[in-house]
Image: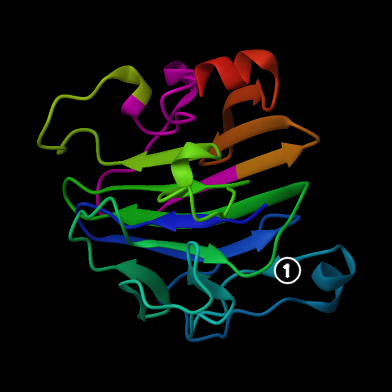
């Protein structure tokens, strides 16, 4: 799995991504983003050190040139809305994982976390190859949204249980989690599982 952050149509902030268990760190904290010995022993890996974008690169690239940067301990996109660029990926790959991150969006923001993407020259954008956990400010988005475009969906494929979704208002922090276990996928929002599906099945490929 390579995790991908998608540039937004407005500003988004994402902080403290980790593999294996849930670890969150406020962007306002003065403490560095680190792991305890117990967390390391449990298999945790930080995807963001709170200071730099070390460990990230352009999609289909070898270095990082896309317009993401670190602001006040958060990963932030400049947000010009380009679809042909603005994707950054982890420089390591993961197969089965639990990925957790805190995020907030500016008004009308639209972003996402993609996973198990394939980097090949014939794929200009990552979303044609892997699932995406959609992040979007639904109430303030300037255009009408279909259900498959809304927060928490497996983009254009699987819909969450809206009755279980408790979303903090735009500009406040939310937490999302993706669990991937041998093709079984779960999307979580603020501590509640909102969606699960099976990836790589005939049905999945038909939807993709």
Q: Pointer 1: what residue? A: 45
Picture quadrant of residue 167? top left
Q: Is residue 71 above or below residue 42?
A: below
Q: Is residue 61 above or below residue 167?
A: below
Q: For the residue labelled by badge 1, is the local secondary structure a helix, a strand or a loop? A: strand
| Residue displayed at 57% across by 80% down | 49
* Frontmost residue, 60 versus 21: 60
Name the residue furthest front.
122
> Residue 124's x, y, as percent?
41, 51
Per the rendered image, the range of residues in magenta is 149-177
Residue 40 counted in the magenta span: no
> Residue 202's x, y, as percent?
67, 15
Does any portion of residue 23 appear in the rendered image? Answer: no
Left or right, 189 with respect to 12, comes to right
Q: Is residue 197 above or below residue 139?
A: above
| Residue displayed at 67% across by 32% down | 185
| Residue displayed at 33% across by 29% down | 150
Left or right, 105 with respect to 63, comes to left
Picture quadrant of residue 11? bottom left
Principal secondary structure, stretch drawn in magenta: loop
Left or right, 28 with respect to 42, comes to left
Name the residue furthest left.
142
Does any portion of residue 26 appear in the rendered image? Answer: yes
């Amino acid at each position: 799995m390579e995790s991908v952050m998608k540039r937004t149509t407005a500003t988004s902030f994402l902080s403290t991504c980790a593999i294996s268990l849930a670890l969150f760190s406020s962007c306002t904290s003065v403490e560095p983003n680190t792991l305890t010995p117990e967390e390391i022993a449990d298999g945790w890996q930080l995807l963001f050190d709170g200071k730099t974008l070390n460990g990230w690169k352009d999609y289909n690239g070898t270095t990082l040139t896309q317009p993401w940067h670190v602001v006040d301990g958060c990963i932030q996109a400049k947000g010009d809305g380009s679809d042909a660029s603005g994707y950054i990926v982890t420089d390591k790959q993961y197969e089965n994982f639990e990925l957790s991150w805190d995020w907030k969006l500016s008004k009308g923001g639209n972003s996402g976390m993609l996973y198990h993407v394939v980097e090949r020259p014939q794929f200009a954008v990552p979303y044609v190859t892997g699932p995406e956990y959609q992040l979007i400010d639904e109430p303030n988005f300037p255009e009408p949204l279909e259900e498959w475009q809304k927060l928490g969906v497996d983009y254009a494929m699987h819909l969450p249980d809206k009755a279980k979704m408790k979303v903090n208002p735009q500009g406040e922090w939310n937490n999302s989690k993706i669990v991937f276990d041998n093709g079984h996928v779960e999307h979580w929002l603020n501590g509640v599982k909102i969606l699960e599906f099976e990836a790589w099945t005939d049905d999945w490929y038909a939807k993709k």
